[in-house]
């Protein structure tokens, strides 16, 4: 890798051309990934990609006037310390609207900052002037993005897209996570407290709870992943939903299992019961906030179900 300070004026200009072309293709990728769910934002990125093409053309015309037709291949990864994109977000599906907006803002900001810092250390006056001009161009891109957002992504369009993003978040994360948390918190109560009251041994009870939590997490993860490939429902990729559901199921079971690491049986049991109450309250709050369920109704449904499973476990363990 070459240091930026070692680049010639010709190489700096070639790097800028390559950078503009790459940014244009990134914006095209964002536009394609957003077009189905967020058409207004897709149009913004289409316009930004077109502007990047215009900037590349102007840079190439300047390059050709100064250095001729030969354009050396020099890219971000060829220059030490140059701005690197740590993830190919534009290739991911589905695309998160806010993630894309933040990524695009950081692209322009980081590139502008790099050009300005490089200009401060450049010794050649022509290179310094070129870097300043490139920095101003990147700042202009940011202004352009703001203007395009105001003219294309109107308040009504933004509200509509934000609502779509909210629904996708619910389908892809909240819903499978909530199902997993409910299953882990409720279904593991019976085996855990049955083992507790059958043995009055905290370590053995802890092992039963761990086995039930991990087993339930694996089962729920596979069940959620195999239930829907997300192509028609928009619920996201199966592995993502399965992972969210499986992890939350395990967490739901571990919450009231971990207190049985306490050696004293009755202290461990009281702490575990308190944790169960907190878990059920959290589940009720999540249902109220994200699933539009009245808190009292959600709490009643969750508490009744949890109480029945809890009582069943105690009765079975005590028999």
Image (cartoon, rainbow, N blue to C red):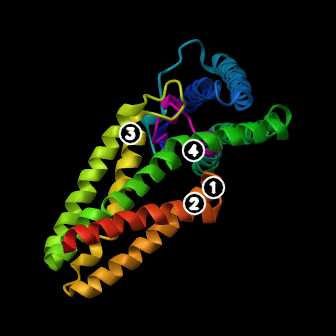
Secondary structure under tag 3 reads helix
Assess whether mark 1 and mark 2 are in contact (beta carbons under 8 angstroms).
yes
Left of 172 or right of it: where is 113?
Answer: right
- Start-end of magenta stretch: 82-107
Q: Residues within 10 Å of mark 3 (few under 14, many from 20)?
A: many
- Which residue, given by chain and number where applicable, does mark 3 sit on? 224
In the rendered structure, which disc, 2 or 4, sits on the residue that comes first in sequence? 4
Residue 104 visible in rendering: no
In three-dimensional space, the C-alpha distance between marks 3 and 1, rounded to whole angstroms, equals: 22 Å
Could you say where residue 57 lies in the image, as x and y percent from the top left?
69, 19
Could you say where residue 230 lies in the image, as x and y percent from the top left?
48, 29
In three-dimensional space, the C-alpha distance between marks 2 and 4, rounded to whole angstroms, equals: 21 Å
Instruction: Please state which of residues 22 and 36 is positioned toward the viewer in this rendering.
Output: 36
- Which residue, given by chain and number where applicable, does mark 4 sit on? 169
Assess whether mark 1 and mark 3 are in contact (beta carbons under 8 angstroms).
no
In three-dimensional space, the C-alpha distance between marks 3 and 4, rounded to whole angstroms, equals: 16 Å
Q: Residues within 10 Å of mark 2 (few under 14, many from 20)?
A: many
Residue 106 drawn in magenta: yes
Residue 278 drawn in magenta: no
Assess whether mark 2 and mark 3 are in contact (beta carbons under 8 angstroms).
no
Instruction: Please state which of residues 104 and 306 is positioned toward the viewer in this rendering.
Output: 306
Residue 170 visible in rendering: yes
The residue mark sitting in front, 1 or 4, is 1
The residue mark sitting in front, 3 or 4, is 3
Q: Residue at x 18, y 72 (%)?
A: 319
- Which residue, given by chain and number where applicable, does mark 2 sit on? 298
- Which residue, given by chain and number where applicable, does mark 1 sit on? 293
Could you say where residue 39 lies in the image, as x and y percent from the top left?
71, 27
The residue mark sitting in front, 2 or 4, is 2
The residue mark sitting in front, 3 or 1, is 1
In three-dimensional space, the C-alpha distance between marks 2 and 1, rounded to whole angstroms, equals: 6 Å
């Amino acid at each position: 890798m070459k240091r930026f300070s070692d680049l010639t004026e010709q190489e700096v200009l070639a790097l800028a051309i390559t950078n503009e072309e790459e940014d244009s293709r990134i914006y095209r990728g964002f536009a394609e990934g957003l077009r189905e769910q967020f058409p207004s934002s897709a149009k913004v990125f289409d316009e930004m990609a077109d502007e990047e093409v215009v900037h590349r053309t102007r840079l190439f015309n300047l390059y050709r006037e100064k250095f001729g037709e030969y354009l050396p291949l020099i890219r971000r990864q060829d220059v030490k310390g140059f701005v690197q994109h740590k993830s190919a977000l534009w290739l991911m599906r589905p695309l998160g609207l806010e993630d894309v907006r933040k990524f695009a803002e950081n692209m322009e900001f980081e590139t502008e900052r790099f050009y300005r810092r490089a200009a401060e250390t450049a010794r050649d006056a022509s290179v310094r002037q070129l870097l300043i001009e490139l920095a101003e161009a990147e700042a202009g891109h940011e202004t352009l993005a703001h203007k395009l957002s105001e003219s294309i992504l109107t308040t009504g369009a933004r509200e509509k897209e934000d609502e779509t993003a909210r629904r996708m978040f619910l389908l892809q994360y909240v819903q499978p996570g909530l199902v997993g948390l409910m299953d882990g918190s409720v279904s593991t109560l019976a085996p855990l407290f049955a083992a507790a009251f059958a043995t009055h041994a905290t370590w053995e009870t802890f092992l039963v709870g761990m086995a039930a939590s991990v087993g339930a997490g694996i089962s729920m993860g596979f069940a959620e992943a195999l239930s829907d490939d997300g192509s028609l429902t928009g619920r996201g990729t199966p592995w993502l939903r399965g992972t969210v559901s499986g992890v939350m199921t395990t967490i739901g079971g571990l919450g009231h299992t971990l207190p049985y690491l306490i050696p004293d049986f009755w202290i461990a049991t009281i702490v575990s019961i308190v944790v169960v109450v907190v878990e059920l309250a959290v589940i009720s709050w999540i249902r109220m906030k994200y699933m539009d369920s009245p808190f009292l109704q959600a709490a009643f449904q969750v508490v009744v179900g949890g109480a029945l499973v809890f009582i069943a476990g105690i009765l079975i363990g005590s028999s």
